[in-house]
Amino acid sequence: MPPNLRPRVRVLAVTVVAAALAVAAVIFVLRPSNTPADDAAARSVAIGGPFSLTTQNGTPLSDADLKGRPFAIFFGFTHCPEVCPTTLWELSEALKALGPDARDLAVLFVSLDPARDTPEALKSYIASFDGRIIGLTGGEADVATLAKAYRVYWQKVPGEGGDYTLDHTTAVYLMDRTGGFSGLISYEEAADTRIAKLRALAAKS
Ligand code: NI
């Protein structure tokens, strides 16, 4: 296939994987369970998990720091040619559209490429987007543990001259104030839907 089609195909493949994972997660969350406690436990373990990472400013940030705040979390890498910059731009536009409704909402961009995405690299990259977006990086193992907790798919793809790129899940995960999984924004979802989902997440008690 022509080289210019390959990123599109990859985006499609990763989107399909993300959609399948989302369906699996929803089935898991909605599965019949015996007690309300089981149900709550299932919801709390289905997607998401604790983390302790470093922001683009070199300061530590953990899930405990976000306690009581809803957040949108997205996994990618700064060398990403298309999906990450598009998504971060769309999230920036959504934050602007939400105005004061975005007050409590945290937006996190976690690097799946911490070897290259140092806090300094993240900082200069993130500067192109809304100043409220928090970039996160850390040790390879810490990042991998968090990505797995979110059922994120990612795969290193060798490029030319020893370079590499990453295929990765393109969805944005929406987490409510209790840290529970609340839904997804999929790649290329309509702006209105994207904004409505974020507004609903921010308003959810
Ligand atoms: Ni990307």
Image (cartoon, helix red, strand yellow):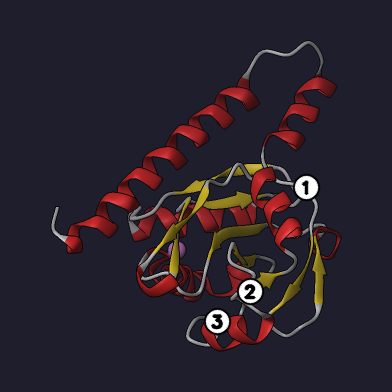
The residue nearer to you, when weighing 6 against 58, is 6
CA–CA distance between discs 2 and 3? 7 Å
Question: Mark 1 and mark 3 in contact (Cβ < 8 Å)?
Answer: no
CA–CA distance between discs 3 and 1? 27 Å
* Tag of residue 126: 3
Query: Closer to the N terminus: mark 2 or mark 3?
Result: 3
- Residue at figure coordinates x 76%, y 47% from the top left: 49
Where residue 7 appears, x then y in whole percent?
Answer: 28, 59
- Residue at label 1? 178
Q: Is residue 59 left or right of residue 119?
A: right
Q: Is residue 92 left or right of residue 64?
A: left
The residue nearer to you, when weighing 62 against 142, is 142
Q: Is residue 179 left or right of residue 184?
A: right
Disc 2 crowd rating (10 Å Cα; few below 14, some 14-19, many 20+) is: many
The residue nearer to you, when weighing 72 against 19, is 19
Residue type marked 2? Gly
Disc 1 crowd rating (10 Å Cα; few below 14, some 14-19, many 20+) is: some
The residue nearer to you, when weighing 165 against 149, is 165
Quarter of image, ligand 1: bottom left
- Residue at figure coordinates x 80%, y 52% from the top left: 50
- Residue at label 2? 135
Query: Closer to the N terminus: mark 1 or mark 2?
Result: 2
Q: Which element carries disc 1, helix, strand or loop? A: loop
Q: Which element carries disc 3, helix, strand or loop? A: helix
Where residue 30 appears, x then y in whole percent?
Answer: 62, 22
Disc 3 crowd rating (10 Å Cα; few below 14, some 14-19, many 20+) is: many
Q: Is mark 3 within 8 Å of ligand 1?
A: no
Question: Mark 3 and mark 2 in contact (Cβ < 8 Å)?
Answer: yes
- Residue at figure coordinates x 56%, y 89% from the top left: 124
- Residue at figure coordinates x 72%, y 85% from the top left: 57
Residue type marked 1? Thr
In this view, which residue lies farthest toward the left?
2
